[in-house]
Image (cartoon, rainbow, N blue to C red):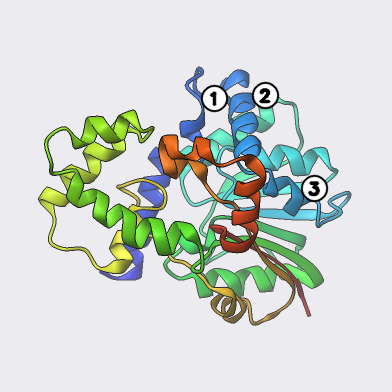
Amino acid sequence: MNNASVQERVRAYWDNHPCDSDLSDRDRLSREYFLEIECQRYELQPHILDALAKIDWNGKRVLEIGAGVGTDARNIIGKGGLYTGINVDRGSTEATSQALRLFSLPGIALERDATSLDFPDGAFDVVYAFGVLHHIPEAGKAVAEIHRVLKPGGELLVMLYNRASINYVLEIMFLRKLGLRILSVPGATALLQGMGFPREKLERHKELNRQQRPMTDEEWLSRNTNGPDNPYARIYGAKEAAKLLAAFRIESNEVYFFDHRHWGALSRLLPRNVRTMLGRHWGWHRVVYAKKT
């Protein structure tokens, strides 16, 4: 399957599943909906706020690639950023636009493809892309566009899924493959649901397993990052991230985030400080801060 076809599937997926939209069951696109998502996002991933603190946003022209439902956008604008956000799909773009309207915040949200931006060279002081580049089949083209639209000395803050993580090495490539086999045993779904795993996702994994030929490791990875129907995701070790961002001077390349939700009821045995320690050594999120030379 060619990159254009995969990219269209990516667009369609996020159009129907804007990032973090599953974190609230309030009236969709209401003020309460956005506030609950914000609360859940930063409670689960406090390192996002730490990452945002790496940059002085005040007065900076900011491009966010993959704005989702506009949670980080509101934070950046609140810190004085002159904000432009893009999403590849209409659903996420409308959600971000609505968030900015509801909270009376300046800034614009546009439906754009990160591999072909229509902004002038050097148009931005900062580009921010948290958890987005690894969902772009032609990530190298997106990075080249980021480099073009950043001014000399401009700042880049990105998050990439981390290869050397508990989530990938232990959960995705071992435990979940084992779990898929267990799901064929009568009563296994109810048992796993009782342990805290969402029944809807378990049933969907079972259904896909019955329908499809054996998956490649890349397909398996994609279906075990952002839901069983997610069409595309990749992971990056430290050297792979540095290679992707070779046109920039990397200032920091750090890992965060042990996602305790993936461990169901077992996560209750792990105190918060232990989860933080696991995240800082084998976390799922690789956060890279770099500058354009």
Along the horizontal axis of the image, is 148 left or right of 117?
Answer: right
Where disc 1 sits, the SS reads loop
Give residue 29's mark: 1
Q: Are marks 3 and 1 in contact (CB under 8 Å)?
A: no
Q: Is residue 68 above or below residue 245?
A: above
- Residue occupying the point 13% across, 41% down: 185
Earlier sequence position, callout 3 versus callout 1: 1
- Residue occupying the point 64% across, 32% down: 38
Q: Nearer the viewer, mark 3 or mark 1?
A: 1
Residue density around tag 2, few if under 14, some if 14–19, many if 20 or more, within 10 Å = few
Q: Give the amino acid type for the residue marked by disc 1 in the picture.
A: Leu
Residue 17 occupies quadrant: top left
Q: Is residue 91 above or below residue 61?
A: above
Frontmost residue, 177 versus 220: 177
* Residue topped by disc 3: 82
Name the spot of residue 72 as percent of width and height, x first. Answer: 68, 42
Earlier sequence position, callout 3 versus callout 2: 3
Name the spot of residue 195 as percent of width and height, x first. Answer: 36, 33
Where disc 3 sits, the SS reads strand
- Residue occupying the point 67% across, 73% down: 147
Q: Give the amino acid type for the residue marked by disc 3 in the picture.
A: Leu
Give residue 102's mark: 2
Residue density around tag 3, few if under 14, some if 14–19, many if 20 or more, within 10 Å = many
Residue density around tag 1, few if under 14, some if 14–19, many if 20 or more, within 10 Å = some
Q: Give the amino acid type for the residue marked by disc 2 in the picture.
A: Leu
Along the horizontal axis of the image, is 269 left or right of 156?
Answer: left
One can see residue 221 in this view: no
Where disc 2 sits, the SS reads helix
Residue 233 occupies quadrant: bottom left
C-alpha span from label 3 to label 1: 23 Å
Along the horizontal axis of the image, is 283 left or right of 137?
Answer: right
